[in-house]
Image (cartoon, helix red, strand yellow):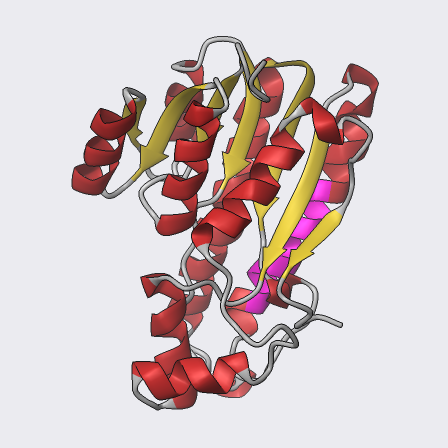
Amino acid sequence: MRRLEDKSAFISGAAGSIGAATARRFVAEGARVVLSDIDADRLHALADELGAEAVVADVTESAAVAAAVARTGELDIAFANAGIFGDVAPVAEYDEEVFARVLAVNVLGPFHVAKHALRVMRPGGSLILNSSVVGLTSDPGISAYATSKHALVGLMRTAAKEVADRGIRVNTIHPGPVDNAFQHRIETVATGQGEARAAEIFESMIPLGRHATPEEVAAAVVFLASDESRFVTGATIPLDGGMSI
């Protein structure tokens, strides 16, 4: 028996590297998956690859998320994965429109996924929110991103208590630097260095000395989606190579 056999799953931000790696693992483990993203071309290419359903939706729009979630029918698993980074600047100088946009995507978006998924999720289901290592820590210049990722912990802990009586589990994952384009853009902006040197600087801050792969993050999501984690809820799961120690 595959770990997600006969389960129905929804993934937002599915066109990114973590979303796509998770989608591939979900399908390999037997789940029926509905994929959502705003990048229509990459989303449909992934859906065609996996034989999955694709719904183009902006997570900041409640009605769009509700319609996308509804395509799953009876829902067992939801992975709120869509996110953006913003800028690097001191709090006193941070652009207010950028700050608001980061919170709209990174907080309001997962809230919409949680709101609409939990309404239809079957007993024993699992909601996973993708936070970040900076949802447990922070650094200068990243006030919007860190604030948004810390906020997901509050959302998760509240929801976990609200749906525990239905046997539904809610958890956050907190990836550190992942070897993907999203992270490399963050590193070059944060350090002002080229991609290779910026990656070296970030790896020097990771006790395990390397970036994670998207597949390693996906493996943790599969665990939280499966019945193997049926007694895990309200947890903040670091996937950061020791960066938050």
| Position in image of residue 69 (x %, y %) | 44, 21
| Position in image of residue 18 (x %, y %) | 43, 48
Image vertical order of residue 116 relative to residue 5, above or below:
below
How many numbered dots are placed on residues in this image?
A: 0
Residue 242 appears left or right of 66: right
The N terminus: image quadrant: top right
| Position in image of residue 4 (x %, y %) | 56, 20
Is 154 included in the stretch rendered in magenta? Answer: yes
Residue 231 appears left or right of 222: right
Q: Magenta residues: mostly which secondary structure?
A: helix
Residue in the foreground of this view, choosing between 205 and 103: 205
Residue visible at 41% across and 33% down in the picture? 23
Residue in the foreground of this view, choosing between 173 and 27: 27
Is 18 included in the stretch rendered in magenta? Answer: no
Residue in the foreground of this view, choosing between 65 and 42: 42
Residue visible at 34% across and 72% down in the picture? 185
Residue with the most extreme front position: 1
| Position in image of residue 180 (x %, y %) | 36, 61
Query: Which stretch did the figure color magenta?
Result: 146-156
The C terminus: image quadrant: bottom right
Image vertical order of residue 143 relative to residue 109, above or below:
below
Query: Is residue 74 visible to us here?
Result: yes
Image vertical order of residue 230 relative to residue 158, above or below:
above
Residue visible at 30% across and 87% down in the picture? 194
Where on the picture, by quarter, is residue 126? top right
Query: Is residue 190 visible to us here?
Result: no
Where on the picture, by quarter, is residue 84? bottom left
